[in-house]
Image (cartoon, rainbow, N blue to C red):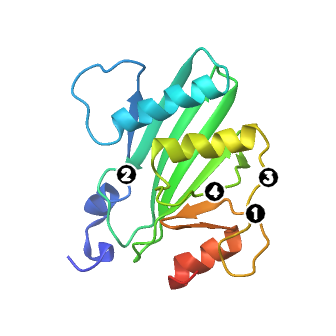
Amino acid sequence: MDSIADLSPADRDRYTRMDTLTITPYPTGPEYGCEPAARQVAEAVCRLYGGNAWRAEHKSPAWPHPENELHSELTITINNVRTIVHRHTVPAHTGRDLFALTVDGRAVPAHLPPHALPHQPATIVANLWRDLHQVAPTDCDSLGCPDVPTILTYGAALCPTHAQRYATTGHI
């Protein structure tokens, strides 16, 4: 198979279907993939925002394929009041990972400490802590850009304009 277009319509649906994993406060059986890390993020975020209950879901492609833009999302709801979404996007035909955080639909300024990875629970919670405590955001990592970064890649925090350029060209 060279292209998704070569597949029959019935098979094509398989590559666009999303799997949803409900994260529970306690393991309910064997865990796989992102479940332990998602629980760790949900618990830390709940503590950060002073909540006493959380719900979390992780959505990801059932059958990832490089011809599709891939999205996976961790959605955490705290006390049925606040919603935090950690989105991981990989544009089609690239290996360029982009990570973004939102709180109640508002983009969170992104900061990537040295040697940290954007998908690590500690990085996610640290960015939410910086936002909650109104720590002044840093500038975009693109040379000379004073805009506030809201998107992380491996090794850089970018504003939406430079993140789009990175997604299409691979250059920051």
Q: Determine whether 171 is above or below 14 in the image.
A: below
**Quarter of the C terminus within the rendering:** bottom right
Are discs 2 and 1 less than 8 Å apart at CB? no
Q: Name the image quarter holding residue 141.
A: bottom right
Residue wearing tag 4: 111
- The residue lying toward the viewer, choosing from 126 and 92, is 126
Q: Which residue is mark 3?
A: 136
Q: Is residue 19 left or right of residue 117?
A: left
Q: Earlier in the sequence, mark 3 or mark 1?
A: 3
Residue under circle 1? 148
Specify few, some or many for label 1: CA neighbours under 10 Å numbering under 14, 14-19, or 20 or more. Answer: many
Secondary structure under tag 2 reads loop
Counting residues from the N terminus, which is met first, the one under dot 4 or under dot 3?
A: 4
- Residue furthest top as drawn: 52
**Looking at the image, which is closer to me, 4 or 159?**
159
Q: Residue at x 35, y 41 (%)?
A: 34
Tell me which label, 4 or 2, sits earlier in the chain: 2
Specify the amino acid type for callout 1.
Val
Tell me whether circle 2 and circle 3 mark residues in contact (CB < 8 Å).
no
Seen in the image, is 61 located left or right of residue 8? right
Q: Position of residue 164 (x, y in %)?
A: 62, 75
Nearer to us: label 4 or label 1 = 4
In this rendering, the answer to whether 36 lies above or below 143 is above
The amino acid on which the numbered mark 4 sits, given as a three-letter code, is His
Q: Nearer the viewer, mark 2 or mark 1?
A: 1
Q: CA distance from mark 4 to mark 1?
A: 10 Å
- Residue at (43%, 30%) from the top-left corner? 39
Q: Amino acid at mark 2?
A: Arg
Cβ atoms under marks 4 and 1 closer than 8 Å = no
Q: Nearer the viewer, mark 2 or mark 3?
A: 3
Q: Residues within 10 Å of mark 2 (few under 14, many from 20)?
A: few
Q: Which mark is residue 17?
A: 2
